[in-house]
């Protein structure tokens, strides 16, 4: 079976995990700050807060930015549901901005048009969450410029994008955003089994992210609102959660980071090879904007259905029948039953829906061999020309 994405675990990763298992701290040990510092250093953000998933990171990012009832968060429809659910966890409302048909990322012109209308209606968003789909950076400068005019905060959902860069600087440095979020789920670029991280350059936001990660509890004198009772003392100053990462996971993260560059390089080799091998087929291959260097979490092809006899679903099923576990990223969030109960409807975001009707994520991960890639290409060729 060839999966669309999967982890690459080596002996060093295994040794790092085993070492923690026989140590004193299975959680909240030295690997957490080590992992945080390493990610902060490579991405150029001042602070990094490790948590148990990107979903949790998105939630505490919204809490740190004080999203609550009466507020609105905007994201794109073609993302994982976590990008928008985080607003609902906070009692806020969600709305969507359609995508750019070339990059499949948030369209800055659609964002601007929607902001103009929202301002007139008194419905401006408090937070906008652009998603670096498949690892390709969004037009961060364009979104940031609009945030200066309309006063919204930005959380980058960079779940696909660790190791990528934008205008020559690493994704995660949060130059154009308030907070950036990474995911370390096994299909993503590096893994901690489950895990995520929130990065920021802002002292106060970093402090708040730390509080919300662990019950809203602090042992820091400076954050306490009344005097300490004694050395055992802690204070709960916010309503937080238990979103902590274990030391076992952080050790795996530290070890995986050693190969981040190699992973990205291999992903680019695979992408380049797909580019050559698929060039003559009725497919739209991933457009790469010159401002960005993608982490290539996904390799998404769009079927040119007017030139293909089989339907989108038939092509997908023909590949699955050959044990090629293709996938589709993503079902537009606004078409999910839960979201339709809030009033969203098919037809609301035509570009995201058009994309959904044509897209397939074909295998892309560092352990994919050339022979496996050839097998995928042959199967795709057959499905498209049958
Ligand atoms: C994977 C993913 C998430 C959620 O990540 P978890 O670590 O599994 O919680 C959020 N947003 C996007 C775009 C993702 O791909």
Image (tube, grey):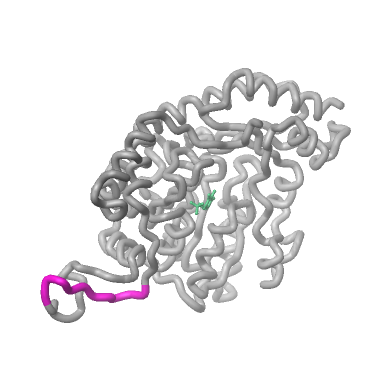
Q: Nearer the viewer, residue 158 or 116?
A: 158
Residue 2 lies, with reference to residue 238, above or below; the image says above
Q: Is residue 166 visible?
A: no
Residue in the picture at 68% in, 37% down: 326
Residue that lies at the very extreme toward the front in this rendered image = 22
Above or below, 377 against 361 in this view is above
- Image position, residue 219 (x, y; %): 20, 68
Name the quarter where the N terminus is drawn.
Answer: top right
> Where's residue 366, x and y in %?
51, 28
On the question of residue 142 being in view, the answer is yes
Residue 327 placed where, x, y %? Answer: 67, 41
Q: Is 222 positioned to the left or the right of 38 in the image?
A: left
Which quadrant would residue 236 be assigned to in this image? Answer: bottom left
From the image, give the main secondary structure of the stretch colored magenta. Answer: loop
Which range of residues does the magenta coloring cover?
A: 230-239
Which quarter of the picture shows residue 365? top right
> Is residue 236 shown above or below 110?
below
Q: Residue at x 44, y 57 (%)?
A: 155
Residue at 41 percent of width and 62 percent of height: 61
């Amino acid at each position: 079976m060839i999966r669309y994405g999967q982890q690459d675990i080596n002996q060093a990763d295994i040794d790092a995990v085993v070492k923690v298992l026989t140590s004193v701290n299975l959680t909240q040990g030295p690997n957490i700050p080590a992992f945080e510092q390493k990610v902060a250093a490579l991405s150029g953000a001042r602070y990094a807060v490790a948590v148990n998933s990107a979903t949790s990171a998105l939630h505490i990012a919204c809490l740190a930015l004080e999203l609550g009832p009466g507020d609105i968060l905007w994201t794109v429809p073609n993302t994982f549901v976590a990008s928008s659910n985080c607003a609902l966890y906070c009692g806020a409302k969600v709305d969507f901005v359609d995508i750019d048909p070339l990059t499949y990322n948030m369209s800055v012109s659609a964002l601007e048009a929607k902001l103009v209308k929202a301002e007139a209606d008194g419905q401006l968003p408090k937070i906008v969450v652009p998603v670096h789909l498949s690892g390709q950076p969004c037009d961060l400068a364009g979104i940031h410029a609009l945030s200066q005019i309309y006063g919204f905060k930005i959380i980058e959902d960079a779940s696909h994008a660790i190791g990528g860069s934008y205008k020559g600087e690493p994704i995660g440095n949060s130059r154009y955003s308030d907070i950036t979020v990474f995911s370390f789920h096994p299909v993503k670029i590096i893994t901690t089994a489950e895990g995520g991280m929130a990065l920021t350059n802002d002292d106060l936001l970093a402090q708040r992210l730390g509080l919300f990660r662990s019950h809203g509890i602090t042992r820091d004198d400076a954050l306490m609102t009344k005097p300490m009772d004694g050395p055992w003392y802690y204070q709960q100053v916010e309503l937080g959660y238990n979103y902590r990462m274990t030391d076992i996971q952080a050790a795996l993260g530290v070890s995986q980071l050693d190969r981040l560059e190699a992973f990205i390089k291999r992903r680019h080799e695979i992408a380049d090879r797909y580019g050559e091998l698929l060039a003559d087929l009725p497919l739209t291959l991933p457009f790469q904007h010159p401002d960005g260097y993608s982490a290539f979490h996904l390799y998404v092809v769009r079927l040119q259905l007017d030139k293909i006899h089989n339907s989108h679903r038939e092509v997908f099923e023909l590949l699955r029948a050959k044990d090629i576990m293709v996938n589709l990223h993503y079902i537009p969030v606004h078409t999910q039953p839960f979201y339709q109960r809030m009033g969203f409807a098919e037809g609301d975001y035509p570009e995201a829906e058009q994309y959904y009707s044509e897209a397939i994520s074909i295998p892309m991960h560092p352990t994919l061999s050339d022979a496996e890639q050839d097998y995928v290409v042959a199967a795709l060729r057959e499905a498209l020309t049958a």
